[in-house]
């Protein structure tokens, strides 16, 4: 599926026109074209490559999934790859959506899968239509701004999930302990994926601002500086969460160690209490004469010793908070 838009002198002039008309529109230096491809086939790539003169290596990167976020310079155009992310608070999983873009002087071609909502980007362009006269840099800014904003929202949601997890560390029920362990490792995995797609955005945006092709003009430069500031916020937030996750895992291990120590104290205490009647009955079970042998008083004495020593140990362990 393909979507198109035509801007002429900063005004939206046409939308969803056929791809065959793009060449005709690009003959006018005052026009800017946006072409969006959703789940394109190889034939679509070949057609776009021929239409815009795109480099073969850039086409290979766009058609290959899981490329790293990057900005590549070619003779006729630029190619950038970025990832939009969203965080699922229920499962703790991270949704990653790859978006590729080709930048020419008069066109922006975006490529993505159907799971990425391009309508959000279109609405962002419509909200900042007063900047449409800046052409392709304005389109690129709107696209990256939506991606970075989504990354920041995901980082915030992950931070809230980690804080909620931290509050559950001291729950004692077996089910809660198991849930904390599972969720902590799931959130750690999500944070690792987030770092891989968020941290390279600094190089991508900085590369656009300093590109030798002069992609960003003076009017759009403040907007890209603001975008770069948002990228830094995301990366710094992500790095701080990395330390946060490590602290939670260490705290979880410490809490488990304390629980194990308490369990061992209780088991040891009960073993000591149980050892008392075992020792007394073992002594009185000898096949040798002893004080109270074959007399009722011997039974009473052994029973009294068992009760007194067991209760005494129980009281002692309770005072020491072992039971």
Image (cartoon, rainbow, N blue to C red):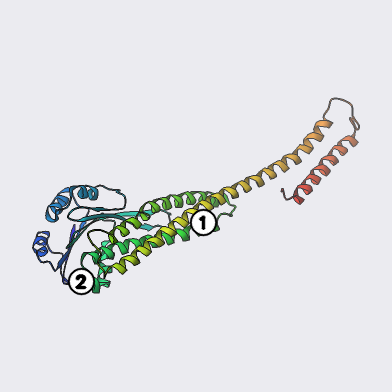
Residue 89 figure quarter? bottom left
Determine the secondary structure under disc 2: helix
Q: Is residue 267 left or right of residue 306?
A: left
Q: Relative to 49, does residue 302 appear above or below in the rendering?
A: above
Residue 121 place in picture, x, y as percent:
27, 64
Q: Is residue 223 left or right of residue 134?
A: right
Q: Farthest residue to the top: give it.
A: 287
Residue 236 place in picture, x, y as percent:
43, 59
> Residue at left 42%, top 50%?
192
Question: Disc 2 to disc 1, how far (Cα)?
Answer: 48 Å
Determine the secondary structure under disc 1: helix
Q: Name the front one of labels 2 and 1.
A: 2
Q: Nearer the viewer, residue 212 or 171?
A: 212
Residue 198 place in picture, x, y as percent:
37, 56
Can residue 89 be seen here? The reply is: no
Of callouts 2 and 1, the N-terminal one: 2
Q: How many marks?
A: 2
Can residue 215 be seen here? The reply is: yes
Residue 278 figure quarter? top right
> Residue at left 27%, top 48%?
65
Residue 172 place in picture, x, y as percent:
60, 52
* Tag of residue 120: none
> Residue at left 27%, top 72%?
127
Q: Farthest residue to the front: give it.
A: 212
- The residue singled out by tag 2 in the image is 133
Q: Is residue 224 left or right of residue 107?
A: right
- The residue singled out by tag 1 in the image is 165
Are discs 2 and 1 less than 8 Å apart at CB?
A: no
Quick one: label 1, few (<14), some, or many (20+) residues within 10 Å? some
Q: Nearer the viewer, residue 269 or 24?
A: 24
Q: Is residue 174 left or right of residue 96?
A: right
Which quarter of the rendering shows the N terminus? bottom left
């Amino acid at each position: 599926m393909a979507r198109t838009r035509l801007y002429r002198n900063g005004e939206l002039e046409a939308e969803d026109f056929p791809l065959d008309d793009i060449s005709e529109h690009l003959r006018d230096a005052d026009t800017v074209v946006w072409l969006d491809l959703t789940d394109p086939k190889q034939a679509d790539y070949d057609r776009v490559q021929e239409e815009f003169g795109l480099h073969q290596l850039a086409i290979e990167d766009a058609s290959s999934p899981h490329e790293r976020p990057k900005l590549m310079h070619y003779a006729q155009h630029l190619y950038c790859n970025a990832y939009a992310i969203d965080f699922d608070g229920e499962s703790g999983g991270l949704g990653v959506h790859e978006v590729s873009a080709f930048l020419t002087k008069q066109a922006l071609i975006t490529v993505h899968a159907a799971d990425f909502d391009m309508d959000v980007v279109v609405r962002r362009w419509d909200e900042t239509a007063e900047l449409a006269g800046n052409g392709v840099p304005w389109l690129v800014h709107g696209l990256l701004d939506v991606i970075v904003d989504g990354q920041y929202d995901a980082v915030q949601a992950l931070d809230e999930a980690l804080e909620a997890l931290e509050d559950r560390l001291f729950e004692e029920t077996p089910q809660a302990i198991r849930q904390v362990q599972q969720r902590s490792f799931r959130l750690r995995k999500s944070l690792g994926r987030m770092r891989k797609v968020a941290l390279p955005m600094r190089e991508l945006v900085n590369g656009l601002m300093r590109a030798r092709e002069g992609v960003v003009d003076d009017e759009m430069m403040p907007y890209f500086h603001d975008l770069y500031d948002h990228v830094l916020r995301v990366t710094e937030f992500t790095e701080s969460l990395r330390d946060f996750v490590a602290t939670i895992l260490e705290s979880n291990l410490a809490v488990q160690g304390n629980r194990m120590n308490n369990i061992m104290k209780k088991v040891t205490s009960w073993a000591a209490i149980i050892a008392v009647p075992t020792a007394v009955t073992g002594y009185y079970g000898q096949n040798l004469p002893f004080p109270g042998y074959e007399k009722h008083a011997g039974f009473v004495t052994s029973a009294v010793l068992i009760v007194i020593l067991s209760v005494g140990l129980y009281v002692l362990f309770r005072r020491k908070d072992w039971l």
